[in-house]
């Protein structure tokens, strides 16, 4: 975790506590090459150190909707994929990442590349036989606008074809795609509000479309402005001075919470404050 992750976690936790809801900790370990149990254990320890407690989820599977680790929910995602495939809205894609990057320019300013539809069938719905070579599974998206109201940025209108393109539901290596997994999990875990960084704003259109196709009700979205370093670049794991291990070595939990609260314009003081005391302060405002 780094300061940007802490910011999103704190804002989500405060929103839940102020509304009397339940905070769900889902372990999003879809990528087998980048996900290890010790990383999730460290994340949980960091949250506890900050005083951010959760009501459901985590590695101990607290709550009725477990397992809360996505690496253990593949059979559930397969059922959702089968439903979409039965509708004739998916197709196999043999394009590699290098193929796609070589033929497309990044979309807008976020570096996103819109798939050109190289493997897309001539008409949809379609039932395309699975090729023997490794392939991803993509979802067909129509030329259609998705409208929703973000709790931070207000009314949003995104065009699925122009802003998103046909997107992957399952990768060629068998790993489940984020878009499908979070939609299924949000629905089954009763998620009503998602708080996350503004870099995922475009993903909302893809997810709302999936909620609709699968017959789920979409949650509300609250996207947070991204925290940047002194060079104006968004925070990443390369910003070691703002990484959680460094922050824990040099600051108390109260100092970190105070810093994030000031950045979020929740209070104008740098005086250390615990997450619970910050919650009480906001309750009284």
Image (cartoon, grey):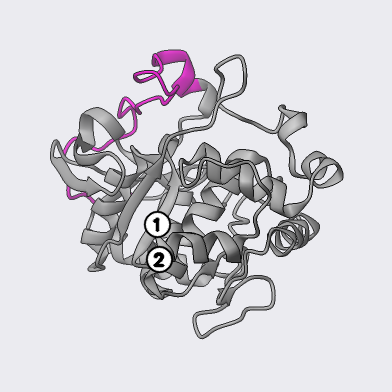
Position in image of residue 4 (x %, y %): 58, 39
Position in image of residue 227 (x %, y %): 53, 31
Residue of label 2: 186
If you read the primary sequence from the N terminus, does the residue marked by circle 1 or circle 2 appear first?
Answer: 2
Q: Secondary structure at mark 1?
A: strand
Taking the view exactly as shown, the residue that stands out farthest to the right is: 249
Position in image of residue 195 (x %, y %): 42, 53
Left or right side of 282 for 203: left
Left or right side of 251 for 70: left
Q: How many marks?
A: 2
User: In this rendering, is residue 240 above or below 273?
Assistant: above
Left or right side of 128 for 257: right
Q: Magenta residues?
A: 99-128
Image point 27% across, 44% down: which residue? 205
Image point 26% across, 68% down: which residue? 216
Q: Say if the magenta span includes residue 261.
A: no
The answer to whether any part of residue 244 appears in the image is yes
- Check disc 1: other Cα within 10 Å, few if <14, some if 14-19, many if 20+: some
Q: Secondary structure at mark 2?
A: helix
User: In this rendering, is residue 47 above or below 166?
Assistant: below
Residue of label 1: 194
Q: Are marks 1 and 2 in contact (CB under 8 Å)?
A: yes
Q: CA distance from mark 1 to mark 2?
A: 9 Å
The answer to whether any part of residue 139 appears in the image is no
């Amino acid at each position: 975790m780094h300061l940007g992750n802490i910011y999103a976690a704190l804002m989500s936790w405060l929103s839940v506590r102020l509304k009397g809801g339940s905070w769900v900790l889902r372990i999003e370990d879809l990528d087998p090459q980048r996900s290890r149990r010790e990383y999730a254990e460290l994340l949980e320890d960091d949250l506890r150190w900050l005083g951010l407690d959760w009501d459901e989820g985590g590695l101990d599977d607290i709550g009725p909707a477990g397992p809360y680790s996505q690496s253990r929910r593949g059979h559930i995602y397969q059922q959702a994929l089968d439903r979409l495939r039965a509708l004739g809205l998916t197709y196999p894609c043999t394009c590699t990442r290098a193929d796609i990057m070589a033929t497309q320019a990044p979309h807008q300013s976020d570096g996103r590349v819109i798939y050109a539809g190289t493997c897309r069938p001539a008409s949809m719905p379609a039932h395309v036989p699975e090729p023997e070579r490794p392939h991803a599974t993509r979802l067909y998206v129509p030329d259609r606008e998705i409208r929703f109201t973000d709790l931070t940025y207000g009314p949003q209108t995104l065009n699925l074809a122009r802003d998103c393109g046909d997107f992957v539901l399952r990768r060629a290596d068998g790993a489940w795609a984020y878009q499908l997994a979070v939609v299924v999990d949000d629905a089954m875990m009763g998620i009503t509000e998602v708080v996350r960084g503004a870099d995922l704003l475009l993903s909302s259109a893809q997810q709302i479309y999936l909620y609709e196709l699968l017959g789920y009700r979409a949650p509300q979205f609250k996207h947070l402005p991204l925290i940047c370093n002194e060079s104006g670049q968004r925070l990443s794991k390369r910003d070691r001075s703002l990484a959680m291990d460094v922050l824990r070595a040099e600051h108390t939990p109260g100092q970190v919470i105070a810093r994030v609260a000031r950045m979020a314009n929740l209070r104008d003081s740098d005086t250390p404050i615990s997450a619970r005391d910050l919650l009480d302060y906001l309750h009284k405002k």
